[in-house]
């Protein structure tokens, strides 16, 4: 019997397995033939996340600013003093994390698809298309549509957003500045991005559920607006992101991490930061649970308490801001541009912490001239 079977060989699964494998018998099962494909990520991370991943990254570009385009075309320029984010090769990252987990002693079996489990007093029986597996614990790291998460009952995330992106041949105006667009024309309910890397650009968007047009149709419009010919698109990816968290990230002999746990930042849709923060807490909980042979839901709840203490505040504050944002019309967004298009606001945003972006709203609203003008827009969005 394994100590833990981790379902999913993405970053959540392999980072977790790498930590646990130091002292435990850990098996990772991944349905695809390797980690990292299909890629479902823009590959934008902060330097902190890059450090926490603990592997050498293939860095495609270093980003130090953003042009935020509002619906009527107003451009808000954010420029940091140093590097604000790295554009990385995400497939390369996933592969390196899998190699690192294997080096630490985790066994990774590719081409094994998990279909369900039954949990008893003696352990977990996992059903896969390659037969049954036995383990003391099951760790769901099986991404946005996690089957392990759903084995805990009604455990859907608050919402999904739907993303699409393309890498295209295109020389951007600035080498280290990305462009973000907000508003209903290109990315209703979220935002679009254009991130330069050399003679290429990674261009994409997410939309919330319930839009009449598909993400692909919005991408077509975005390519056109950015002057990118369809023939210059060299690759395309799509995926969905769970937003707002899932009701539970633990159960009897069960823990969830990453997208499977809904651990995604609601404002940016980024998931790598949360994984890096949650994995050591999961490792600690599992160590104690196995040592004391207390693998029930009550004991494993320590994990949820731990990760919520670490990153839960950003999640709940970020989700409130997201709810307000999704209720704003294009007109409201343009009014906001009129309010914040000032040097003092720009300097607040120049210093934004991309791993904890919600803190910026507090700083902005603290300015009386800005706060008072925001109030009617916020109140309307709340009703
Ligand atoms: C368009 C888009 C852009 C994004 N951009 C960024 C970004 O710039 N920065 C950032 O930090 N985050 C970004 N994200 C989010 C980020 O990609 C995810 O949060 C991250 O991949 C979550 O990692 P994970 O290991 O939890 O899940 P995944 O990376 O989805 O890995 C889950 C793994 O489980 C496997 N699996 C699933 N079901 C089974 C099964 N039944 N049996 C066996 N294996 C299974 C899958 O094949 C997969 O390999 C983006 C997401 C999207 C969709």
Image: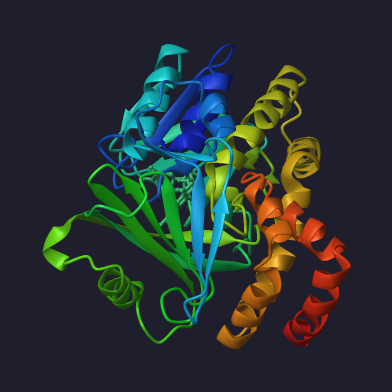
Residue 161's place in the image compared with 380, above or below, is above
Q: Position of residue 335 (x, y in %)?
A: 65, 82
Q: Nearer the viewer, residue 123 or 339?
A: 339
| Residue shown at the point (80%, 41%) measured from the top left | 309
Can residue 78 be seen in the rendering of this structure? yes
Residue 14's place in the image compared with 164, above or below, is above
Residue 232's place in the image compared with 279, above or below, is below
Q: Quadrant of residue 92?
A: top left
| Residue shown at the point (66%, 27%) measured from the top left | 280
In the image: residue 376, left or right of residue 230 = right
Q: Nearer the viewer, residue 301 or 43?
A: 43
Q: Quadrant of residue 94?
A: top left
Q: Position of residue 88 (x, y in %)?
A: 39, 37
Can residue 123 be seen in the rendering of this structure? no
Q: Position of residue 182 (x, y in %)?
A: 51, 72
| Residue shown at the point (57%, 16%) measured from the top left | 24
| Residue shown at the point (76%, 28%) measured from the top left | 294
Q: Nearer the viewer, residue 190 or 180?
A: 180
Quadrant of the rendering where the C terminus is positioned = bottom right
Residue found farthest to the front: 343
Q: Quadrant of residue 333?
A: bottom right
């Amino acid at each position: 019997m394994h100590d833990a079977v981790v379902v999913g060989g993405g970053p959540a699964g392999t980072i977790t397995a790498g930590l646990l494998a130091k002292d435990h018998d850990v098996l990772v099962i991944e349905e695809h033939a390797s980690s990292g494909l299909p890629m479902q990520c823009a590959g934008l991370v902060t330097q902190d996340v890059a450090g926490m991943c603990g592997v050498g990254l293939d860095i495609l570009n270093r980003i130090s600013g953003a042009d935020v385009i509002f619906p009527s075309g107003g451009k808000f320029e954010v420029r940091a003093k140093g590097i604000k984010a790295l554009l990385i090769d995400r497939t390369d990252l996933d592969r390196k994390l899998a190699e690192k987990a294997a080096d630490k002693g985790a066994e990774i079996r590719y081409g094994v698809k998990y279909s369900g489990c039954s949990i008893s007093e003696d352990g977990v029986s996992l059903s896969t298309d390659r037969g049954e597996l036995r383990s003391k614990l099951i760790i769901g790291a099986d991404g946005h549509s996690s089957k392990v998460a759903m084995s805990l009952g009604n455990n859907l995330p608050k919402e999904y957003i739907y993303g699409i992106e393309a890498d295209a041949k295109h020389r951007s105006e600035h080498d280290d500045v990305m462009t973000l667009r907000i508003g209903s024309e290109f990315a209703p309910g979220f935002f679009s991005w254009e991130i330069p890397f050399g003679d290429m650009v990674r261009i994409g968007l997410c939309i919330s559920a319930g839009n009449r047009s598909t993400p692909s149709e919005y991408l077509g419009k975005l390519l056109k607006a950015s002057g990118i010919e369809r023939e210059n698109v060299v690759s395309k990816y799509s995926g969905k992101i769970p937003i707002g968290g899932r009701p539970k990230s633990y159960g009897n002999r069960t823990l969830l991490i990453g997208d499977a746990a809904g651990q995604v930042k609601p404002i940016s849709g980024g998931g790598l930061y949360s994984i890096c923060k949650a994995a050591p807490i999961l490792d600690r909980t599992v160590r104690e649970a196995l040592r004391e042979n207390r693998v029930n839901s009550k004991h494993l709840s320590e994990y949820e308490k731990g990760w919520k203490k670490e990153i839960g505040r950003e999640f709940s504050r970020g989700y409130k801001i997201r709810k307000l944002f999704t209720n704003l019309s294009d007109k409201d967004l343009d009014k906001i541009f009129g309010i914040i298009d000032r040097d003092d606001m720009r300097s607040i945003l120049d210093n934004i912490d991309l791993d904890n972006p919600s803190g910026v709203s507090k700083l902005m609203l603290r300015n009386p001239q800005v706060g008072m003008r925001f109030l009617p827009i916020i109140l309307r969005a709340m009703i």
